[in-house]
Amino acid sequence: MRKQHIQEVTHRWLEPASGSQTASSEDALAIDGIDHLELYVGNAKQAAFFYTHALGFSLVAYRGPETGYRASASYVLQQGCAKIVISAPLRAVDPLHAPINRHSDHVHSIALTVPDCQRAYYEALKRGAFSACPPYQITDSFGTVRIAEIGTYGEVTHPLVERVNYTGSFMPGYLNAAEIFPLMSTPSIGISAIDHIVGNVELGKMDFWVSYYERVLGFTEMLAFSKEQISTEYSALMSKVMRNGSGKVKFPINEPAHGKRKSQIDEYLEFNYGPGVQHIALRTDDIISTVTAMRARGVQFLSIPHSYYEALPGRIGKIKEDVAALGALGILADRDDDGYLLQIFTKPIQDRPTLFFEVIQREGSERFGEGNFKALFEAIEREQDLRGNL
C-alpha cells in the first residue's frame, strides 16, 4: 500500500546560465515575496499538531518514510498565503540533528520566491553573498522546482525558490497530506500572510547585516530605532527594518544595547546559542476574532496592564474596534500618519525563551507599533524576571 504514495523524483545540479549575472541595482534578485519558512524541530508530528490545532494552519503536504523519504519527516502547513514547513530528523546522524541540539525548535530558513533561481544566486554571490547551497532542480510528475541557498545571520539561510509551472502540493517529493493524515487540520483562525520576520544578532553586528541585505539582496532601510526609543528602566535594544524593492518582504534586525540588566536580545542570544529568528509576525484582517480563537485553543500571550487601555483612546483616537474588547484580549494599538495597527505577542512557543509569534492587523499603517515599545518590552521583562533571566 505504501508504494502507491511513492513518486519518482529526479535531482539535478545546475550550472550558471548564459546571461544570468545581469540584474538591476534597484532589485538585485527580483524577489517576489516569502515562499515559505522552514522550522527544524525535535518532533515534527507533535509540532505540526500544535500549529494546526493552536494556530489554525492546515496540513497540505508531507514528505517522510511513508512517501519513500528516509532521512527526515516534513509537514507543510498553510493558512492564507502563509506557509510553514515543520521538519525533524529521523536519525541522530542526520544533518538536522546538530542545529536542533543547539537551538531547540527554531527557524532554519526563510525561503524567497524568485523568477530565476540561477540568476538570483550567482548575482547574489557576485554581490558578496555567503553560499549555503548551489542551484539544483527537482522534478516529479507535477513539474519542476529550482532552488539555491544563501546564508544570513547565524545558521539561518535564504533558499531562492523558482517554481516552473509546478502544480503539485508543495515541491517534488511531497504528497498531498490528506492521503496520509486526513484528520490533522483544523478550522482557520483568519491568518492571511506572513507580515514580517524579526532577527536577533549580536552587539555590534546589526549594521553588518543591514549592509549585507542592502548590498546582496537589494533591500533598503525602511526604519531605524535607537536604544532611546526601545528601552525601559532596565534594558534596551536597537533595531533597523529592511525591506525588498516591492515592499512585500520586511526583515527587522535587532541587536542588544547596554543597560542596567540583561535585555530580551541578550536572553535570546544566550538560549539560542547565537543569532537567529526571534519572532514571526502573522497578519490577520480581524485580530479580535483571531486572538479569541487562539486563546480558546490554549495559546498564551504577554499580559498588558489595565492602565495601558485607560490611556489608549486619547493616544490613538477613533478606531473601528471596541477598546474594551482589545483590553480584554491584551491587544496593543498604535497610530501613525497613514493609519493604525493592532498587534499582540505570544509567549515563547517552546521551553527555551527564544521563538515567539506576533499577530498583527494593519489599518493603513505599515510601521511596527513604536508607541507600544515601552509597554511591550516591560511585559517581556516581567516574563524574563519570572524565568530569572532579567
Image: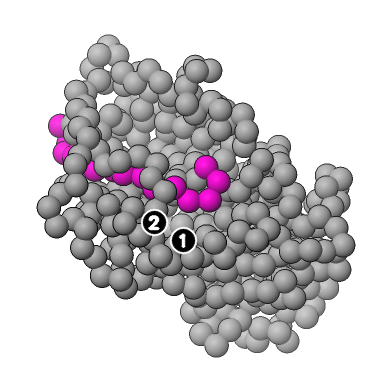
Quadrant holding the N terminus: top left
Identified by mark 1, the residue type is Tyr
Query: For residue 247, what is the image quadrant?
Result: bottom left
Above or below 10: residue 112: below
Q: Residue 97: x percent and y percent?
A: 53, 26
Above or below 106: residue 213: below
- Whether residues under marks 1 and 2 lie with C-beta atoms below 8 angstroms apart, the answer is yes
Q: Which mark is residue 128?
A: 2
Q: Residue at x 40, y 27 (%)?
A: 181
Front residue of 100/274: it is 274
Whichever of callouts 1 and 2 sits on the residue coming sooner in the sequence is 2
Residue 65 in the figure: left or right of residue 352: left
The residue to which callout 1 is attached is: 212
Gap between marks 1 and 2 measured at Cα: 8 Å
Above or below 92: residue 11: below
The magenta segment is 141-155
Query: For residue 185, what is the image quadrant?
Result: top left
Pointer 2 local density, CA inside 10 Å: few below 14, some 14–19, many at least 20: few
Q: Residue 55: x percent and y percent?
A: 54, 46
Q: Residue at x 29, y 51 (%)?
A: 121
